[in-house]
Image (cartoon, grey):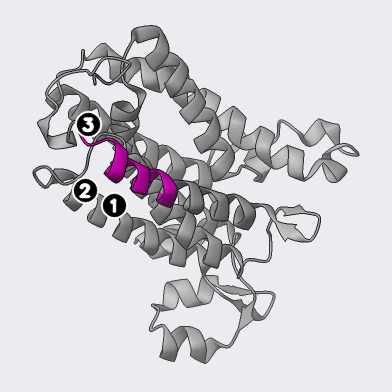
Amino acid sequence: MLPLILSYPVAFDLFGIPVHWYGIIIAVGMLIAIEWITRELRLKGFPEDIGYDLVLWGIPIGFIGARIYYVIFEWSYYAAHPNEILQIWNGGIAIYGGVIAGALTLFVYCHKKHFHPFLMTDIVAPYLLLAQAIGRWGNFANQEAHGGPVSESFLRQMLHLPDFIVNRMQIDGVYYHPTFLYESLWSILGVIVIMWLRGRKQTLKVGETTLLYLIWYASGRFFIEGLRTDSLWWGPFRVSQVLSLLLVLFGVSAFIWSRTKRLDAQYYTDVHGPLPLVESR
């Protein structure tokens, strides 16, 4: 049933307005992430209203950031079509823009509430990655975010993909790399690895879950982005590849620093309540 449903970009019309599977799938991913983030916040001893605050501020600002990021790097088009800047239903949001805007919002919120921001990002990170994995299937419904041409035999015999994916990857008679699927599977594997490490006693210090998220997602995105045909460009460079490389370098450097300099930092599993804004020394 699901493969048949996702074979059409529009789910239904609401008062004459088409409701796309793209938006529904992204919403489902966010709702699942919100549920698990709220649960984790309760387990860590945070007030319940914290989760609602993050939803109220983080999601809309994240969407705005995702759109602004995309428009900036496609400005040559939108400068000539300014009436389309707000038309996100036609596509054109960038995950990195949303993550950056959401992270800045979370840091400001934590500063005002005097919470340790990296404990909050540790709570959010794996569920954000799960939402990203689910959201990529919206690209599948839209037949977008795919890679370059491949043969049908590559999809069937090499990758052993089911018919509904192979058929959807045929666009105007040409088969394409299902890069949406590569990123979704990479992200799901990342959720499993990060959750396992985060849940082990005295394995990851506060802030290191966040760094693992950055390293994992950005390293996969760097290679997958190289296959895509719809990349945003900055001169001769793919924007997402440049940013991914910078995030991996930052994440690895910060992780090494955490292991060598933050010797008395608390482990994630040892935290049972909001940490103060600044770690004690």
Magenta region, residue range? 252-265
Position of 254 with respect to 16 (left or right) is: left
Residue type at mark 1: give it.
Val
Label ID, residue 92: none
Q: Are marks 2 and 3 in contact (CB under 8 Å)?
A: no
Tell me if mark 3 has few (under 14), some (14-19) or many (20+) residues whose alpha carbon lies within 10 angstroms of its own: some
Residue type at mark 3: give it.
Ala
Q: Is residue 126 above or below residue 16?
A: below
Residue 32, horizontal then vertical, whole percent: 30, 38
Residue corresponding to mark 1: 191
Residue 109, horizontal then vertical, whole percent: 42, 15
Residue corresponding to mark 2: 195
Q: Earlier in the sequence, mark 2 or mark 3?
A: 2
- Is 129 contained in the magenta span? no
Label ID, residue 265: 3
Tell me if mark 1 has few (under 14), some (14-19) or many (20+) residues whose alpha carbon lies within 10 angstroms of its own: many
